[in-house]
Every structure is written in C-alpha cells, then in structure tokens.
C-alpha cells in the first residue's frame, strides 16, 4: 500500500509527465469520496474487476469525517493497485480531490469515478482500445443512469452516443456540449498536461467548465456506444444528502449554475470558439434552465422573485437563435419569468413536457395572431415569445387538441375511494357549448382497466368542471398481483374522435395510502396516490403487493411526526376534508 497524505500546491498545470516505467499502469482511475464509507467499496470493486487489469486506483478522500479513511486504507491494503490519498482539509467540491489525484497518477490515460457510482466491467478495456486505435485526446462512451428508488435504467443523452464515430473537434457536432460529464471519458494525460487542463477549484458544476474546455481544446476524440459508466440517481434524497444537481431548491445552487455558464462563455471567446455560443446557450436553456422549470410551480413568490433576480440578467445575454430552437411551451415560461409574471410562470411551467394548454389565450383580431394569457402582449419581444399561433389551437385534429385538466379538490370517499373535482380548460373553444361526457381511465395492465364516466358542466366559455369518484378497490388486477406506476387520464369525444389528456394533481397533495384486498383469493395490495414528483405533478398511482388487508385510507404524512409533515398535513386540510 502507498499511503499519500501530502498537500499539493500547484493545481493549475501539474508536474510534467514522467517516462512510463515497465511496471506502470495503463490507466489510472481516480475515485473521489467524501463521507461515503458505505458505497466506496462498491465503486472501488467495480474498478478492480475491470477486464483490463493493468490499472491504478487512486482513492482521493476530500477529508472525510466518517469511517471513509478506515475503509479506504483497508481497500488499499488488500490490493496493491489501490492508492489512498487524503486531502489535508475539505475542499467542498469535486475539483480538488481530482486535481490532487492527477498529481500522483502514474498512468498515461486517466478516468474519474464518483464513490456513489460504478464502472461497467469492460469500461477501461473499451475506452483504452479506442485510444490505441488512433491518437486521441480523449474517448467517451455511454452512461447508464440507474434510479436507486426502483432500479429503472436509462441511457444519458442516448442520441449522442448511438454510434461509433471519431470527430476532429467539437465543431463537427456541437450537440455534444449536452454531454458535459467528465466521468464518461478517458483522457490522454499528455492532452491534459499540454493545455494545463485541470478541474476548476472553488466552484460547483465544475464538470461543465472542464468538459467545455476539453471539447474545445481536443483535436480528435472518439465516441463509442458501449456503456462506460453507471450513474446512480437518487431523485428524492433528503436535501442534506442530495447531489448538487438535485439541490435546486437552494438559491445558491442557481447562482452557482449561472456563474459557471459565464465562465464557459468567457472561455469560448478567449479560446477562439465564440461561434459555439448559440449551441452552448441552447444547451443551457434546454438542459440547465429546464431542470429548474419543472419545480417553479412549487415555489413561493419570494423564491421566484429571487430566482428571477439571479437568472434574468443572464438570460438577457443569450443568443436569440437559442431561444428560437426551443419548444414554444418552454419559451413561454422563459418570457413570463423575464417579465416577472410570477403567478403566470407557475401556470405555464406545470404543463411542460405533456402538451398541456394554458388556461386562457387571447386572439389579436388586427394581426390574426394568438397569444398566451389574458391580453395581447405589449412589447415586440413578448409578442414574439408568447405567440401561440403556430400551435394551431383551433384547427389541429381533436385527438391532438391542447386542453388542460386540473384536479382542484380531493375528498376521501368510502373505503378506498377518492372523489376528484376536475376542471377542464379549453382555451381555443374546441368543445361544443353545454355539458361534456368525459371518462376517467386507469389501465394497470393489458386488458385490465377502470373506466368511470362522468359529466363536465360549463362554467364559462372555455372552462368546464365535473366530479368523479376514483375507487381503487374497483381496479381489477392479476391474481398474482401487480407492482408499478400508472397515471389516470381523462378522455373526451367529439364527432367520433377521442382526446386523451393527463390529470394535473393539486400542488399541495401529501401521499395517500390504501391497503386493499381486491377480491377473494387475489393478492392484496398497498396503493399510494400522489403527484408525480415535481415535473409536472401528474396524478400518479403506485401498486405494491402486500399481505396486509386493511382498507383504511389515510394520509401517509400524518403517520410521521416531524415539523415538515405536520405542516404538509395542515396544508392538506383544505383538500382532504
């Protein structure tokens, strides 16, 4: 074991690369860790079982205060390929641990791994083979995102890694700016040293700046479709343990994200890559801002005002062409925020990603244009961004019509039932005057569905309201049980055509749990009704087989005695009467 504890004082450039010795590793994988003794062994084990075994593993500990040092030393004692490096004080970020490890790394190729993630077994072999085929600055591959709350696996930015290709510079495909992870890549040490490229210290979202620099400085790099990283995602982690990306409720998080964008902008100009600015701005709007947008309906006025103060000055610097490439619904949210129409921001943001209409639109008889909201915008910029004419709200086929279905009230009914009050907004007046026949549909499996007809009565032109009972015990499930998530939908018919739309749940909606024995001989289930996360709050139902047969419906939040859940229960008092 080589234990390294000394601090290093020149992170900007690092030492010159030493000649490789006969026993030098081919690849150094740095595993950064802070207070993660439980998951560190899994991360290190994923490196040690690589099919390419001539590697070095540097555990770079950002001065952990838990059992991480003991665990790391034990790992190093068991395998001579493992080196333990402990920083003399906590840096508060990912950059310093990576930079300190770079200074002792012995291999000509470098990779980075976080302690809560893993490398697939062939990751090193795959990326190293790409380097040995051609003289590359770095090679990159696919990232598998795995949700820890259910195991669902998806590929990060799959369209960017769908096929093997070698690019002579980022200009060949600026879309790759969306893939800003440093951990999905294997870098040639000579490339990093030639440009003095190190992780920026003292900032968050350091990967974005480091990756932008690597893309712009690289002469040649290869993309491979094989998976090279497993990224474990905990979307509902407690705020104190959530990743930086999941701490979007913190205004400091917003400030950090904007700050790193400004650093990237300055680098693009300084390095002669100003032509990439529109592509980079589009990436910011489509990815970075979009991450906050789904949460905006849940923020109060003070938070939204502070968010606008931080975000709007930067939004005003972005290329107009970047806005033009966005879907109209996202442009509306951005414009409303820039105008500080905070209550309208909440309404517009709730429908993102699900073809949900605004509550109202306003036609301008003079121009023939149709605008979001209750009046024609005053400025030319607002008219451009809030113009919905291209959506053809009044002429598109009915099955694609833009309507909006909001649950405005939820009352517990008998047994395991809920009485829902639903408002349907029809801003383009597609529905005929008078009561509408609607149907609530819930399909937990093929050939198994619940269909509940009800009536939507007119309140005013473009607004209907109705009441429907959702009886969870009436849903037919397989005898062996069913586990999964489903989202009820509302269906309307017009002249033989059917429109299907999502149901937006109340924002203040603590989860409700029912334990239901569906019928004699069938598997009983625990069923939870709740909004779908924070984007955009669809009504969601989760079935889980269980041996319990109680049929009492009770708010889950009431079972926990914490200030947060007591507050949630008080807020819910007006909904669950």
Image (cartoon, helix red, strand yellow):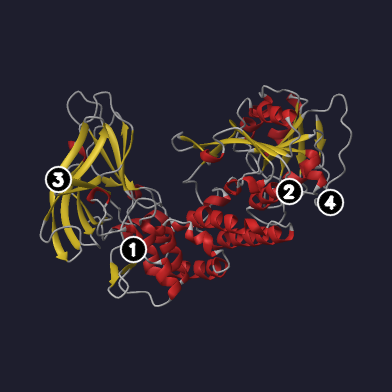
Mark 2 vs 4, N-terminal side:
4
Q: Tell me whether the residue at label 4 lies in contact with that at label 1, contact meaning CB atoms closer than 8 angstroms.
A: no
Residue picked out by circle 3: 496
Residue at the spot 59% in from the left edge and 63% down from the top edge? 255
Which mark, residue 389?
A: 1
Q: CA distance from mark 3 to mark 2?
A: 59 Å
Q: Quadrant of residue 546?
A: top left
Comparing labels 2 and 4, the label whose residue is closer to the camera:
2
| Disc 3 secondary structure class | loop
Residue at the spot 30% in from the left edge and 70% down from the top edge? 368
At label 4, counting other C-alpha atoms closer than 10 Å, the crowd grade (few under 14, some 14-19, many 20 or more) is few
Q: Residue furthest front?
A: 367
At label 2, counting other C-alpha atoms closer than 10 Å, the crowd grade (few under 14, some 14-19, many 20 or more) is some
Q: CA distance from mark 2 to mark 4?
A: 21 Å
Q: Quadrant of residue 331?
A: bottom left
Q: Nearer the viewer, residue 35 or 311?
A: 311
Query: How far across and how far down the image is residue 103, in percent?
Result: 82, 42
Q: Tell me whether the residue at label 4 lies in contact with that at label 3, contact meaning CB atoms closer than 8 angstroms.
A: no
Mark 1 vs 3, N-terminal side:
1
Q: Quadrant of residue 553?
A: top left
Q: CA distance from mark 4 to mark 1?
A: 57 Å
Which mark, residue 521?
A: none
Comparing labels 4 and 1, the label whose residue is closer to the camera:
1
Residue picked out by circle 4: 10
Mark 4 vs 1, N-terminal side:
4
Q: CA distance from mark 4 to mark 3?
A: 72 Å
Comparing labels 1 and 2, the label whose residue is closer to the camera:
1
At label 3, counting other C-alpha atoms closer than 10 Å, the crowd grade (few under 14, some 14-19, many 20 or more) is few
Q: CA distance from mark 1 to mark 2?
A: 43 Å
Q: Nearer the viewer, residue 363 or 65?
A: 363
| Disc 1 secondary structure class | helix
Residue picked out by circle 2: 217
């Amino acid at each position: 074991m080589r234990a390294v504890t000394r601090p290093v004082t020149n992170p900007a450039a690092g030492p010159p690369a030493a000649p490789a010795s006969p026993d030098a590793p081919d690849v150094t994988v740095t595993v950064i860790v802070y207070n993660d003794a439980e998951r560190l062994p899994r991360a290190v084990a994923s490196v040690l079982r690589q099919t390419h075994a001539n590697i070095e593993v540097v555990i770079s500990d950002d001065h952990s205060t838990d059992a991480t040092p003991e665990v790391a030393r034990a790992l190093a004692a068991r395998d001579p390929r493992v080196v333990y490096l402990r920083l003399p004080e906590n840096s508060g970020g990912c950059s310093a641990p990576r930079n300190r490890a770079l200074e002792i790394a012995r291999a000509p190729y470098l990779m980075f791994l976080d302690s809560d993630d893993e490398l697939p077994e062939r990751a090193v072999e795959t990326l190293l083979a790409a380097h040995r085929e051609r003289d590359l600055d770095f090679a990159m591959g696919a990232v598998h995102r795995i949700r820890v709350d259910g195991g669902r696996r998806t590929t990060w930015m799959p369209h960017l890694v769908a096929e093997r290709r070698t690019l002579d510079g980022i200009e060949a495909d600026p879309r790759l700016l969306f893939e800003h992870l440093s951990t999905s890549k294997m870098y040639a040490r000579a490339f990093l040293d030639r440009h003095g490229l190190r992780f920026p210290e003292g900032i968050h979202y350091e990967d974005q700046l480091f990756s932008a620099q690597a893309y712009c400085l690289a002469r040649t790099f290869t993309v491979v479709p094989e998976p090279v990283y497993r990224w474990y995602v905990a979307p509902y982690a407690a705020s104190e343990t959530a990743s930086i990306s999941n701490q979007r409720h913190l205004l400091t998080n917003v400030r950090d994200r904007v700050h790193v964008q400004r650093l990237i902008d300055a680098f693009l100009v300084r390095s002669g890559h100003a032509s990439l600015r529109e592509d980079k701005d589009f990436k910011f709007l489509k990815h970075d801002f979009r991450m906050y947008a789904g949460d905006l309906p849940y923020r109060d006025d003070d938070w939204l005002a502070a968010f606008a103060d931080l975000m709007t000055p930067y939004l005003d610097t972005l290329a107009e062409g970047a806005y033009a490439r966005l879907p109209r619904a996202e442009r509306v949210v951005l414009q409303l925020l820039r105008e500080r129409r905070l209550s309208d921001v909440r309404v517009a943001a709730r429908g993102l990603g699900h073809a949900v209409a605004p509550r109202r639109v306003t036609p301008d008889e003079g121009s023939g244009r149709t605008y979001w909201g209750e009046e024609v915008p005053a400025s030319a910029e607002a008219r451009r961004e809030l113009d919905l004419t291209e959506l053809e709200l009044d002429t598109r086929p009915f099955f694609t019509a833009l309507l909006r279905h909001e649950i405005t009230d939820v009352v517990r009914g008998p047994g395991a039932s809920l009485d829902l009050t639903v408002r349907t907004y029809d801003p383009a007046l597609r529905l005929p005057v008078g009561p509408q026949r609607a149907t609530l549909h819930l399909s937990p499996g093929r050939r198994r569905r619940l269909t509940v007809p009800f009536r939507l009565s007119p309140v005013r032109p473009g607004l209907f309201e109705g009441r429907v009972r959702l009886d969870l015990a009436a849903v037919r499930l397989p005898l062996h049980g069913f586990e999964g998530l489903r989202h009820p939908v509302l269906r309307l018919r017009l002249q033989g055509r059917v429109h299907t739309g999502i149901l937006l749940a109340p924002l203040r909606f603590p989860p409700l749990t029912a334990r239901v024995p569906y019928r004699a001989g069938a598997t009983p289930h625990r069923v939870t009704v709740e909004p779908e996360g924070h984007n955009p709050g669809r009504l969601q139902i989760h079935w889980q087989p269980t041996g319990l047969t109680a049929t009492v419906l009770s708010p889950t939040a009431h079972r926990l005695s914490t200030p947060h859940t007591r507050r949630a229960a008080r807020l819910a008092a007006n909904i669950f009467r």
